[in-house]
Image: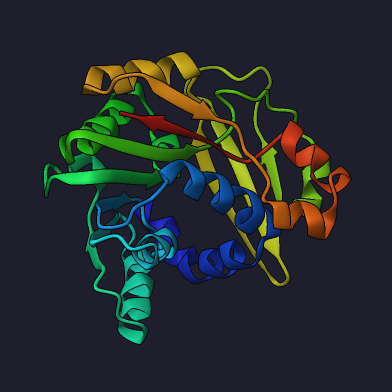
Amino acid sequence: MHASYDDISLAYKIVHGELTVKKHAEEFTYLNLLGDVQGKTVLDLACGEGRFSRTIKHGGAHQVVGVDISAGMIELARQAEDQQPLGTTYIHADVASLGTIGSFDVVSAAFLFNYAASKEALLALCRTAYSNLKAGGKLVASINATPLFPLLNNQATRKYGYLVQGPSPLREGDGVEYSFFTGNHSIRLRNYHWSRATYEWAFRQAGFGACNWQAPTVSPQGLEEHGHEFWRDFLCEPNFICLECS
């Protein structure tokens, strides 16, 4: 996985920075679930080029540590930190074998768990998240939408800058292809489908309590700029969902 991300790291940053659906739905839903981070310590797993890490630090977090398996992504994150120092630390490491590096109030994991190609790999990621949380802390994650939404292989989502394609019906562990595109840049990523029951099994095995699943919501600004009708196909086949585990 890390080699492909090293190759596409710059295109990934550009695409994710420009897509309307990222700003008005993904970021809006995720940050609402994350809640107030003022004065908190946050571990940002699968931090990529540091987009959420920086947003969380701007939100008043006392400490933010970002971790990613891609050296290219971490290099972009460190470049951004050099250009605008926020006091955020970035670590190049595989989350599955990271171990315990601290005791954090919040663990953030945007699009981490959907890269687990087996149940064992999923459980390893969940255990890393749990082992780095303080008692009473919480995990907030975004994953691909297939645990809650059927895969429609719908071309209508092309207007948002993404397509989701995979076998139908989906079975446990099936690969799902996500394509994102804007202007002259495009990226293609492979995620893996796990059912809601499998995710909840893995989180429970790792030590977490109940999971709160959150379907995507669109920001008031996004609704005002584009209208409710524009977002209809996205809400029928979103590219992500979020969850919170305590």
Horizontal and vertical percent for residue 70? 34, 59
**207 in relation to 6, above or below:** above
For image coordinates 57% across by 51% down, the residue present is 28
Question: In this image, 139 relative to 177: left or right?
Answer: left
Q: Left or right: 159 with respect to 65?
A: right
Task: State which quarter of the image contains the C terminus.
Answer: top left
On the image, the x and y values in percent for residue 51 come to 44, 64
Colour convention: rainbow
Q: Residue at x 30, y 80 (%)?
A: 85
Q: Farthest bottom residue?
A: 83
User: Which residue is located at x 83 percent, y 56 percent?
Assistant: 226
Q: For this rendering, which residue is in front, 227 or 142?
A: 227
Q: Position of residue 55 (x, y in %)?
A: 42, 63
The answer to which of 122 and 199 lies nearer the viewer is 199
The correct choice, above or below, for 204 with respect to 110 in the image is: above
In the picture, measured across the screen, residue 143 lies left or right of residue 200, that is: right
Q: Is residue 202 above or below residue 80?
A: above
Q: Quadrant of residue 38?
A: bottom left
Which residue is at the far right? 229
49 lies above or below 101? below
How many numbered badges does the structure rendering display?
0
Q: Is residue 81 left or right of residue 244?
A: left
Give residue 82's position: percent from left, percent from top. Answer: 30, 83
Q: Is residue 64 visible?
A: yes
Q: Residue at x 19, y 46 (%)?
A: 104
Visible residue check, residue 161 = no
